[in-house]
Amino acid sequence: MPLAAEGEGFHQPSIAEFFPPAIWFEGTIFEINRIQVVRFVAVAVLLTLMVIAARRARLVPRRGQNIAEILLDFVRINVAEDIIGKEKAHKYVAFLTTVFFAVLAFNITGVIPFLNIAGTSLIGLPIMLALWVYVMYLSAGIKAHGVGGFLKSSLFPPGVPWILYILLTPVEFLQVFVMRPATLAIRLMANMVAGHLMLVLCFAATQFLLIDSGNGALIPFGALTLVGGFAITLFEVFVAALQAYIFVVLTAVYLSQSVEDEH
Amino acid sequence: MIGAALPAASILAAESETVEGWRLLLPASYDIVWSSVVLVVIAVVFYKLVLPKFQAVLDERTEKIEGGLAKAASAQEEAAAAKAEYEQQLQDARAEAARIREEARTEAGQIVAEAREKATAEQARITETAQRQIEAERQQAAVSLRADVGSLATELASKIVGESLEDEARRSRVVERFLDDLDAQTTATAGKGN
């Protein structure tokens, strides 16, 4: 536990936080550590809430259903329809909604007491999410334009003098096939890692300054770090939602660029 | 933040276990396995259960709202039609009233004219009757006057001429001649008067 500093020393936050010891199946591909358990909890809570909301869904919504519907409408209208366009968005609303809810659920565990780490702060999950997005936008592009048409529209942007393709085409190739999924995964993971480290730093410092050090002169500094931890916790709630939003918006943008008509 | 953490760490305490930074970017096999598992579970539940159910409810709601709007529109249309009909009826009634009034006026004019005509005819008739009566009375008066005037004149003449007029034949001739003169004079006067 990052909050439980051991002994008298200051618990220094490090990336070792993200590689906790195994709990079950150590050394196998089914190894389960603390972060996997946090993910399972996130999945269980997310699905329980959503299934209950869906089961109880009525024509005239109640409070819980209203919240679920606000989020669903947010993805459908403000992301899918605004970016991809009303007609084409229809096919991708379910995908975008699922991605948004999944990322949000795994991000928010970073500020939930006793979980205290984001499910997306370990690179595997962001990579799988990004791969899913990658497969979706490539297949959407190929479905819309055929393999040749998709390659032509994404690697040879129209309206450019042909000589520039020498420069543009490799850049576009890297962009479409490497950079997009890589940046999706790394942006999400890095944000969650940084947020976790900030929280650990603040609360570990508070623990040390207020309690472990036993030095009254350090108490004001401890109070300061406690307030800082409080502020960063609120900030991390915002970041969790923001990163989920950024992830799903970029996904919608990539889908839109894949399926948009050639001009 | 990581940069800020390092000096603090060097002052305060040491971390026993170190992990290479690259491990953050390179997923462990178990990480990939469990990430896939949780994503598949979420995807299946969302695609099969949660999203269709919400979609159904949202569609139903949209339908209900659209149905309600259509109903309201039709009700409004009906009301407008009823109002138009009512106004048409009112217009018709007004036109009818005006027509009846016009007819009544015309009829009244006719009645007045007829009455006037009748009155005029009646007046003429009465005037004629009166004239006729006057004429008859005049003639009667003339006849009785002739008889009276004859005897009176005779009497008067007898008194004036005495016995010279005792002779019956002479007296009769004189009276006849006098009356004829009188008659002619009267006729002449009447003719002038007419």
Image (cartoon, coloured by chain):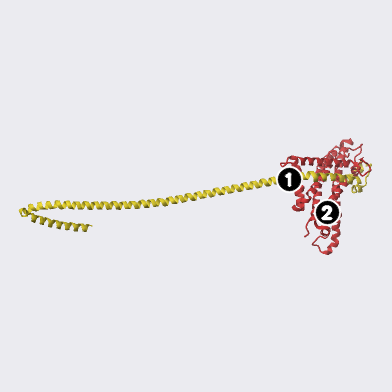
Check disc 2 and report the residue beneath it: A139
Residue B12 vs A153, above or below: the answer is above
Label 2: state its secondary structure: helix
Residue B111 is situated, as x and y percent measured from the top left of the image, at 38, 51
Q: Does any portion of residue B30 appear in the rendered image?
A: yes
Check disc 1 and report the residue beneath it: B58
Numbered label attached to residue A205: none
Residue A136 is situated, as x and y percent measured from the top left of the image, at 83, 52
Q: Please, which chain is the residue tagged with disc 2 on?
A: A
The image quadrant that residue A202 belongs to is top right
Residue A132 is situated, as x and y percent measured from the top left of the image, at 84, 50
Question: At label 1, which amino acid type do we have?
Answer: Leu
Please rate how many residues cluster around mark 2, counting C-alpha atoms within 10 Å: few if below 14, some from 14 to 19, many from 20: some
- The residue lying at 89 percent from left, 45 percent from top is B33
Residue A107 vs B182, above or below: the answer is above
Q: How many marks?
A: 2
Residue farthest toward the left in the current orientation of the protein: B163
**What colour do you see for chain B?**
yellow
Question: At label 2, which amino acid type do we have?
Answer: Ser
Q: Please, which chain is the residue tagged with disc 1 on?
A: B
Please determine if labels 2 and 1 lie on a single subunit: no
Please tell me which residue lies in front, B71 or B167.
B167
**What colour do you see for chain A?**
red
Left or right of B28 in this view: B57? left
Labels 2 and 1 touching (C-beta < 8 A): no
| Quadrant housing the C terminus of chain A | bottom right
- The residue lying at 75 percent from left, 53 percent from top is A87
Q: CA distance from mark 2 to mark 1?
A: 29 Å
